[in-house]
Image (tube, helix red, strand yellow):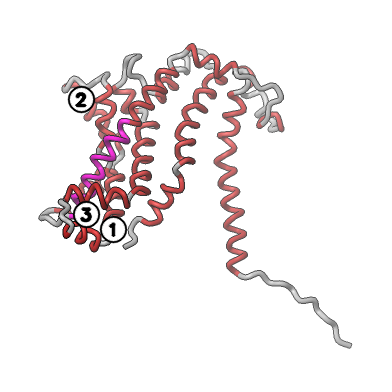
Amino acid sequence: MTTITPNRRRFPRSTVLLIWSTLLAVTVGIAFLVPLWWTFVNSLRPGAETFSYLNPLQWQTFFTTTPTLDNYAALLDSDLGRAILNSLFVSVVTVIVGLIVCATAAFGLSAFRFRGQAALFSIVILSFLIPFDAIAIPLASMFRDWQLQNTFLGLILPGIGNGMAIFLLRTFFLAIPEELVEAGRLDGLGWWGIFTRIYLPLSRPALIGAGLMLFLFQWQAYVWPLLMGTDEEHILGPVALSNMQGQFQVDYGVLFAASMILVLIPLAIILAFQRYFIQSVSTTGLK
């Protein structure tokens, strides 16, 4: 008598790997989303109820049946609105001017060959490996001597020359075929024409990726705005958010509402341009 064993269907290894990778990605995504969601929910509650449902955890911890916008309305009476506008102005100007400076530097490091080029590029790489906070205090002392404290120029200048943006753009520029450059030279284009009519139009994903880096660098900066923007006219968002914490009493509802506004603005920009950023990173280094 023979027994028939059922055929077990085996999934290909690639399918199993895809399933586990997806589960891992979902788990990591939820781990990052939960604190953000908890902050959002508590921004819709009175500050006195912020920690009411933490011990033990229950469904009210992450949901509320009586949402209110009072915390967001309270922000209108604070300095946060002006601080957010200041942050937007500083970040946008940094992106515009910074892209011009970084793209020009990256073009010079990729299109030309000159003595000391490797050493100069090494300095560029070293510049973004050193944490900015490590040089913020001596740099702030120099800016005070130059009368740049409490000026938008003083807040913007350190973010213009970003070594990481130069590195990203230079690597992308190296992937542009040399035949296009030679064709442009034959058509009578100078180096500036080659830069503006060949390099820049082909590098839109890299420019957007570098622009996001410059924007986030300025938007989330805290130490530098704390040192350079000490008056009400030049205060930026992160510093204004920190000032909302009183010495003896903190309204966590208003604090979380302000945090959500400061988070949602860069989040919306990143989601709008994420495909360009992914494309710039994925094609960097390909030639």
Magenta stretch, residue numbers: 93-111
User: Residue 108's spot in the image, x, y percent?
Assistant: 18, 50
User: Residue 25's spot in the image, x, y percent?
Assistant: 56, 51
Q: CA distance from mark 2 to mark 1?
A: 39 Å
Q: Nearer the viewer, residue 53 or 217?
A: 217
Provide the secondary structure element on which disc 2 rests.
helix
User: Residue 284's spot in the image, x, y percent?
Assistant: 35, 55
Query: What is the quadrant of residue 14 in the picture?
Result: bottom right
The amino acid type, in three-letter code, at marker 1 is: Ile
Which-is-in-front pick, marks 3 and 2?
Answer: 3
User: Along the polypeptide, which appears first: circle 3 or circle 1?
Assistant: 3
Name the residue at 14% across, 57% down: 113
Name the quadrant of the N terminus: bottom right
Image disc number at residue 176: 1
Left or right placement of residue 85 versus residue 152 in this view: right
Q: Residue furthest right?
A: 1
Up/down of 7 relative to 201, above or below:
below
Query: What is the quadrant of residue 57 in the picture?
Result: top right
The amino acid type, in three-letter code, at marker 3 is: Ser
Name the quadrant of the C terminus: bottom left
Image disc number at residue 110: 3
Q: Main secondary structure of the magenta part?
A: helix
Q: Nearer the viewer, residue 222 or 168?
A: 168
